[in-house]
Image (cartoon, rainbow, N blue to C red):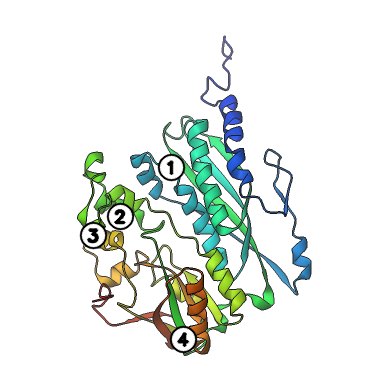
């Protein structure tokens, strides 16, 4: 037994700073609330009414969880923490969107070495912005201080999203048919995948000052700025298309870790292939830059990064024009990137050597 009292704060955990952090994030959290939210943050559980489900034929809850990964190290190098929360929400909300679900609520978990209320408020403000973009409510979360386990300036993020879809309207890979059209939506860059490789070839061995300098290959942006560009959230434009052109979209694929090659096949039945036509969409500068620094072959690039496509919709050919028009009405620029052909549930490529040839 110790001769003198040792407090929790002396052990490295400040409950007072935790309370200040809760107060600092309240405004951001409240900005995400929907009418279905019951109560406020601070309770033992977040409450959300699902009364709207009673009007559905067969309501299904859809859930997804994810993190941001090593992209956080880029944020820490730049000292900018306000956008990684958008990445967190995007990774979860875009995943459940693949079923056609409307994201309803979100919870976050933030682990830090040393809790500072202002820094926590910046992180949660980004999460709240992501929730507003996705249309879901941030109804709770956890801020965990881990002295002795994490470095004082280190932190990690994870999140959990719940959505709702009526089974008759659910997107389903089994609905995909030969002749369907592949319609791609642009990514904003690397999104939140492939950062272990991107950091190795773009960041390691270079000084912080060098990484902050404008780079001609990145159209005047610095390497750190380009790598920190937040993941796009596709919920609102896609949900609008699903309502305006019902039944036209058979399935969709969120292009994350594993790139186009290892994500688009998840939206296919076993009787067809997705034949992607290379060169039919633009590859963002930061993606070109990372692939060039790593000297990746086209095949390796296509299974590592999103290569400029954050989402691919598999659409009935007879309604493809209507889907593209509806997407343009939301401000999107859709790209026809291929078609569904007979096969075995795999992704194949046409136009070998044309990956970077868009607009040439």
Measure the C-alpha gap from mark 2 to mark 4: 33 Å
Q: Residue at x 22, y 58 (%)?
A: 217
The numbered disc on residue 272 is 4
Mark 4 is surrounded, within 10 Å at the Cα level, by few (under 14), some (14 to 19) or many (20 or more) other residues, namely: many
Measure the C-alpha gap from mark 3 to mark 1: 27 Å
Picture quarter containing residue 174? bottom right
In percent of width and height, residue 290 lies at 27, 59
Where disc 3 sits, the SS reads: helix
Residue carrying label 3: 294
Q: Are marks 3 and 4 in contact (CB under 8 Å)?
A: no
Q: Disc 3 or 4, which lies upstream in sequence?
A: 4
Residue carrying label 1: 81
Q: Residue at x 26, y 40 (%)?
A: 208
Q: Is residue 70 above or below residue 265?
A: above
Measure the C-alpha gap from mark 3 to mark 4: 32 Å
Mark 2 is surrounded, within 10 Å at the Cα level, by few (under 14), some (14 to 19) or many (20 or more) other residues, namely: many
Camera-side residue of 234 and 347: 234
Q: Are marks 2 and 4 in contact (CB under 8 Å)?
A: no
Measure the C-alpha gap from mark 3 to mark 2: 8 Å
Q: Disc 3 or 1, which lies upstream in sequence?
A: 1
Q: Residue at x 33, y 78 (%)?
A: 280
Mark 3 is surrounded, within 10 Å at the Cα level, by few (under 14), some (14 to 19) or many (20 or more) other residues, namely: some
Residue carrying label 2: 198
């Amino acid at each position: 037994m110790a001769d003198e009292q040792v407090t929790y704060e002396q052990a490295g955990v400040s409950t007072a700073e935790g309370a200040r952090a809760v107060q600092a994030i309240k405004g951001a959290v409240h900005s995400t609330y929907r009418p279905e939210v019951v109560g406020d943050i601070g309770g033992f559980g977040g409450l959300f009414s699902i009364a709207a489900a009673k009007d559905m034929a067969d309501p299904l809850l859809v859930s997804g969880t994810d993190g941001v990964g090593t992209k956080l190290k880029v944020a820490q190098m730049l000292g900018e923490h306000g956008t990684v929360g958008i990445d967190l929400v995007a990774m979860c909300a875009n995943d459940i969107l693949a079923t056609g679900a409307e994201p309803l609520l979100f919870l976050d978990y933030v682990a830090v070495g040393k809790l500072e209320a202002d820094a926590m408020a910046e992180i949660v403000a980004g999460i709240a912005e992501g929730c507003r973009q996705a249309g879901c409510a941030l109804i709770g979360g956890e801020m965990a201080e881990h002295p002795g386990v994490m470095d004082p300036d280190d932190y990690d993020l994870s999140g959990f999203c719940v959505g709702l879809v009526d089974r008759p309207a659910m997107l389903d890979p089994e609905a995909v048919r030969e002749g369907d059209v592949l319609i791609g939506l642009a990514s904003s860059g690397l999104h939140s995948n492939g950062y272990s490789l991107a950091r190795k070839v773009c960041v390691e061995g270079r000084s912080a000052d060098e990484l902050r300098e404008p780079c001609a290959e990145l159209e005047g942006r610095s390497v750190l700025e380009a790598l920190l560009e937040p993941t796009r959230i596709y919920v609102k434009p896609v949900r609008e298309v699903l309502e305006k052109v019902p039944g036209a979209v058979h399935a969709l694929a969120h292009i994350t870790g594993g790139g186009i090659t290892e994500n688009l096949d998840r939206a296919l039945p076993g009787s067809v292939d997705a034949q992607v036509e290379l060169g039919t969409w633009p590859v963002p500068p930061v993606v070109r830059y990372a692939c060039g620094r790593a000297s990746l072959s086209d095949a390796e690039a296509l299974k590592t990064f999103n290569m400029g496509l954050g989402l691919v919709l598999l659409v009935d050919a007879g309604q493809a024009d209507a889907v593209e028009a509806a997407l343009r009405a939301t401000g999107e620029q859709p790209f026809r990137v291929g078609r569904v052909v007979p096969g075995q549930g795999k992704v194949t490529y046409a136009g070998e050597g044309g990956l970077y040839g868009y607009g040439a």
